[in-house]
Image (spheres, rainbow, N blue to C red):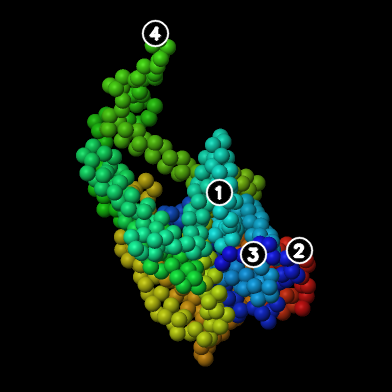
Amino acid sequence: MQADLNTQTPTPLTPVLDEARIEALDVVRGFALLGIFLMNIEFFNRSTSGIVEGMPAGLTGMDWFVSWFIAYFVQGKFWTIFSLLFGMGFAVMLTRAERAGRTGWAFLAPYLRRIGGLAVFGAAHYIFLWSGDILFSYAVGAGALLILLYGKWKLLLIGMAVLIGIGFLPDLSAIFGVAGVLSFVGFLMLYLRNERIVAVVGRRVPVFGLVLLVLGAVGVVGAIVLWLLPNGPKDPRVPLTVVSISMVIIGWLAAQFHNPVALRELRLGATLYTFSFVMMTIFGALQYLKPREPAAPAVVVTNAATLPQPAASAPDAKGTESKPDKKTELTEAEKAARKKTERAKRLTERQEENRHEVKVLSSGTYLQAVEMRARHFPQKVAGDAGFATVLLAMFLLGSWFVRSGVMENTGAHLPLFRKLAVYGLPIGIGLGLLGSTVAVSHVAGNDHDGFQFARGLAMLGNLPACLGYVGMVVLMLHSNSPLSKIRVLAPLGRMALTTYLLQSVICSLVFFGYGLGYWGMARTSQVLFVLAVFAMQVGFSHWWLARYRFGPMEWLWRAFTYRQSPRMRL
């Protein structure tokens, strides 16, 4: 996987020709655009933070059914498909470069420009159109992918040190999270690219597996100590136990399945995604099953400032500071009251922010909307650093599908796609439906409604469901029935960036207050709107590509990536 960065730069890469495209990728991409649109339109009619609240309360009849269907058959399944496709696109570009002998900077330079162009598109989309953008997230995830595949240890450590230093500056503590993600990516490099084997008790163990086994064992010992200490901290007991045991298990699996090299991307991607949402599901279940806290103490504290504070240290006659009187330390009840008060304050702030967002988007001006989104953009950047780990998993899986030859010759791998469809869809959608028996919506501040548990199951099921949908589309494409007409979506898939951005332009002008102001359209009407607009976009893509080689935004992206103006007209 390591690129030779000292290779002499050959002839630059050029945009892919029509005859070199993989039709299955374009068809799946076009299909995914429909699911993305069905999911996104809801959040042109409610606060984008509502995605963590599940189905809106108060729906009845057909509106309830439509919302339920999209929540469990669409939501989460199609951004994962798009992420998978992004990884496939990366692998296609890399494979073409390798076959042409363009390795090292001859490949990395245009791909870095490609990422930079995507980041600009994403930032502009977020600030000027809609705060549900995922393009910038993909750019961040693609950066993490390049670090994983080509990063140098020395540069990685220098970057982490710089980020940690920046994190100490005022109002920049979020940078610590970016440094943490960078260190995590570096840790994954041990599995993907490090071939060193260490002898332990007569057994040969890869470095990555050994590190996980040691960390897990230390964590298990620490957890045992916490459980045995009668007056020890209680909160870390369960999380430390669960995470430590998981690390031991994954460490053992990593040691057993480090080779062959060709399967590492597949195994790492699947494990990374699954581990993330297994943890979410476990902790959601524990939160759901945890006994409710006892009623508040007799003296209810409504303001954290009214709680007794430890006495400030004051210098004595010798000039040394005296220790505070232990009697002024907070009791357990007072600590719990302070914690509850601070949590209520954060909840109130989030609710106020949501109300402000709804007010601006439903009845505010365009400048007010842009100002609000620009103010929130740094938070998105910080959040995308964490989200990059999930995207990284999907990118690795997508890369394996292409590098293994599966997507380049889908007809030869129909049994695999049949298994994906037959097993992936029932398992993936079934996990979400199982969670729906616990909760379909969430009331902010209620940790015992089971929604976190239900959402964890749904997120866990998104991976097999998205693979199942991909398998289904490929089977339809290769069938001898009218289902093969699904290839009508291929031109739309070739114009995915233009189509995605155009959907946001149309929806912002129709639903937001500075446009036609149809904010809050009924869920059934939203779906009819999507089907009408999507049908027009399919027709437009056929008309456009009958005359031009690329969609307008695709042309601009390619021109920036390859530093040339591709011929537009056929």
Mark 4 secondary-structure assignment? loop
Cα distance in 3D space between marks 4 and 2: 74 Å
Identify the residue at horizontal 51%, vertical 66% (top origin): 396
**Amino acid type of disc 2?**
Arg
Q: Which mark is residue 48?
A: none
**Are there few (<14), some (14-19), or many (20+) residues within 10 Å of tag 2?**
some
Q: Is residue 213 visible?
A: yes
Relative vertical location of residue 41 with respect to residue 128 in this rendering, above or below: below
What label sits on residue 157 in the rendered view? 1
What residue do we see at 47% from left, 62% from top? 196
Q: Of the residues under marks 2 and 1, which one precedes in the sequence? A: 1
Q: Residue at x 29, y 22 (%)?
A: 326
Report whether 437 appears left or right of 413.
left
Indicate the quadrant where residue 318 lies: top left
Q: Quadrant of the C terminus?
A: bottom right
**Quadrant where the N terminus lies?**
bottom right
**Disc marking residue 563:** 2
Q: Looking at the image, which is closer to me, 535 or 470?
A: 470
Secondary element at image label 2:
loop
Q: Residue at x 49, y 68 (%)?
A: 265
Please name the residue that numbered disc 3 is placed on. Answer: 4
Image quarter of residue 52: bottom left
Three-letter amino acid code of the residue under disc 1: Leu
